[in-house]
Image (cartoon, grey):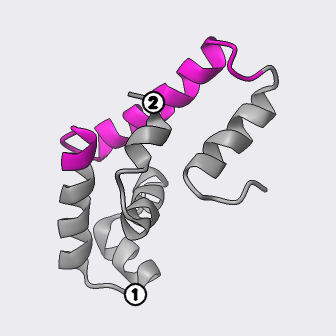
Amino acid sequence: MPLNNLLNKLTKREREICILLINGYPAKQVGFELGIAEPTVKSLTTNIFNKLGINNKTQLVSFVFTDFIKNIANNSFSDPVEAANQFLISLQVKPT
């Protein structure tokens, strides 16, 4: 299933957590950044893993970036910068 379809299964808060986890933030820091308790982060992280059919943060990063690489490999994007921008947009992150 394409990444965008799977990400649409996540709530806005789950996507926010997903982005921070992909960037290597531990649960405590995610909680601080989002103004929520660490146990809430851990609970929502479990929800993310269940919805995406994965088991841990390493699989999350692999899952997201594997989809990104597949899009480039399948020539979905002619320009790698455009591919990166579309990837960030799919995660609801503003490209720089």
Element on which disc 1 rests? loop
The residue indicated by pointer 1 is 35
Q: Position of residue 41 (x, y in %)?
A: 27, 71
Q: Amino acid at mark 1?
A: Gly
* Residue drawn at the location 23% of the way across and 45% of the way down: 56
Closest to the observer: 33 or 51? 51
Closest to the observer: 90 or 23? 90
Residue 64 lies in quadrant? top left
State which mark lies toward you, 1 or 2. 2
Give the spatial CA distance, label 1 vs label 2: 31 Å
Kindly check if marks 1 and 2 are in contact, taking CB atoms under 8 A apart as contact.
Answer: no
Q: Position of residue 72 (x, y in %)?
A: 65, 20
Label at residue 73: none
Q: Is residue 43 above or below residue 79?
A: below
Q: Quadrant of the N terminus?
A: top left
Q: Quadrant of the C terminus?
A: bottom right
So how many labels did they put on this image? 2
The residue indicated by pointer 2 is 2
Q: Position of residue 73 (x, y in %)?
A: 62, 13
* Boundaries of the magenta span: 50-77
Left or right relative to 18: residue 93: right
Majority secondary structure in the magenta region = helix
Left or right relative to 33: residue 83: right
Q: Amino acid at mark 2?
A: Pro
